[in-house]
Image: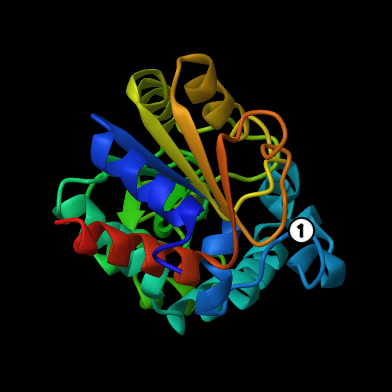
């Protein structure tokens, strides 16, 4: 497979790129045991996402927290980075990847060793007070008594990922725009391109002249619009072949 023309082309694009950004969605974490939100087998087939509406959370923090704990915190605690996460971190260390923009809140890129990560939708590894804005690094003990409370003002603590009705974190949003504007190569992995404004970032990269590599098992909203090179397959398999190809050419 490393001799496959598309893999060889991907390797060449990565080696010749002056600035490469990777953009990941739920699909990259599926192989770590985290189900996607949408589509077949997605969480929203079984659960109504009402509990992730910010107004619902403000009015029903206990009920919202009970589902957040069950669906996210309990699940994430048992998940480990997969080979795709680890290989992306290795490519960053080797100088092939400059940054990762992720829509995922699972922290798996950081666990795998990636350093320059922008979390577009926030992270479960932090809690934020909805009253005073104080941010806490997540500790399991915070979930013993729900809803957790701020030790500064006694306000309710919320997971520091984006609920429906909230804006994108400003630092992550601006950093993502900056990456899209300066990247020569943008590698899109495991995202359908259905969620805005996240889906606008790869399009911005394309508009600014970046080559777009897409790695997905199935075609996405990007494939026929902006993708220059579509690699069909699981993230772990394709990233392994790309990694091997880069090693073979060194």
Q: Is residue 30 above or below residue 194?
A: below
**What residue is rendered at 68% in x and 70% in y?**
67
Where's the C terminus, which quadrant?
bottom left
**What residue is rendered at 46% in x and 29% in y?**
211
Q: Which of 128 and 29 is in front in this view?
A: 29
Res. 147 in view: yes
Could you say where residue 53 lies in the image, as x and y percent from the top left? 73, 47
- Whether residue 50 sits left or right of residue 137 in the image: it is right
- Whether residue 207 sits left or right of residue 38 in the image: it is left
- Whether residue 91 sits left or right of residue 196 in the image: it is left
Q: Which residue lies furthest to the top in this view?
A: 208
SS of the residue under disc 1: loop
Could you say where residue 172 lies in the image, as x and y percent from the top left? 40, 33
Res. 114 in view: no
- Whether residue 246 sits left or right of residue 168 in the image: it is left
Could you say where residue 222 lies in the image, as x and y percent from the top left? 67, 37
**What residue is rendered at 76% in x and 58% in y?**
38
Q: Nearer the viewer, residue 102 or 243?
A: 243
Q: In this view, does 114 lie above or below 116?
A: below
Q: Is residue 94 above or below residue 221?
A: below
Number of marks? 1
Q: Residue furthest bottom?
A: 78
**What residue is rendered at 25% in x and 42% in y?**
15
Could you say where residue 101 lies in the image, as x and y percent from the top left? 41, 42
Residue carrying label 1: 38
């Amino acid at each position: 497979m490393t001799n496959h023309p598309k893999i060889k082309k991907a390797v060449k694009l990565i080696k010749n790129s002056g600035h490469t950004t990777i953009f990941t969605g739920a699909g990259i974490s599926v192989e770590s045991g985290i189900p996607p939100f949408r589509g077949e087998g997605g969480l929203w087939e079984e659960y109504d996402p009402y509990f992730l509406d910010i107004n619902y959370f403000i009015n029903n923090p206990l009920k919202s927290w009970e589902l957040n704990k069950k669906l996210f915190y309990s699940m994430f605690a048992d998940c480990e980075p997969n080979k795709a996460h680890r290989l992306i971190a290795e490519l960053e260390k080797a100088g092939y990847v400059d940054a990762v923009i992720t829509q995922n809140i699972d922290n798996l890129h950081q666990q795998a060793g990636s350093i320059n990560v922008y979390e577009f939708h926030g992270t479960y590894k932090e809690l934020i007070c909805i009253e005073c804005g104080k941010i806490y690094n997540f500790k399991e003990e915070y979930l013993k008594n729900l809803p957790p409370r701020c030790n500064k003002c006694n306000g309710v603590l919320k997971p520091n990922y984006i609920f429906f009705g909230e804006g994108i974190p400003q630092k992550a949003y601006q950093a993502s725009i900056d990456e899209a504007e300066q990247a020569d190569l943008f590698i899109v992995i495991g995202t359908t391109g259905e969620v805005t404004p996240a889906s606008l970032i790869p399009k911005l990269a394309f508009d600014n002249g970046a080559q777009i590599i897409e790695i997905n098992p199935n075609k996405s909203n990007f494939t026929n619009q902006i993708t220059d090179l579509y690699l069909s397959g699981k993230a772990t398999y394709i990233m392994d072949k790309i990694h091997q190809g880069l090693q073979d050419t060194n």
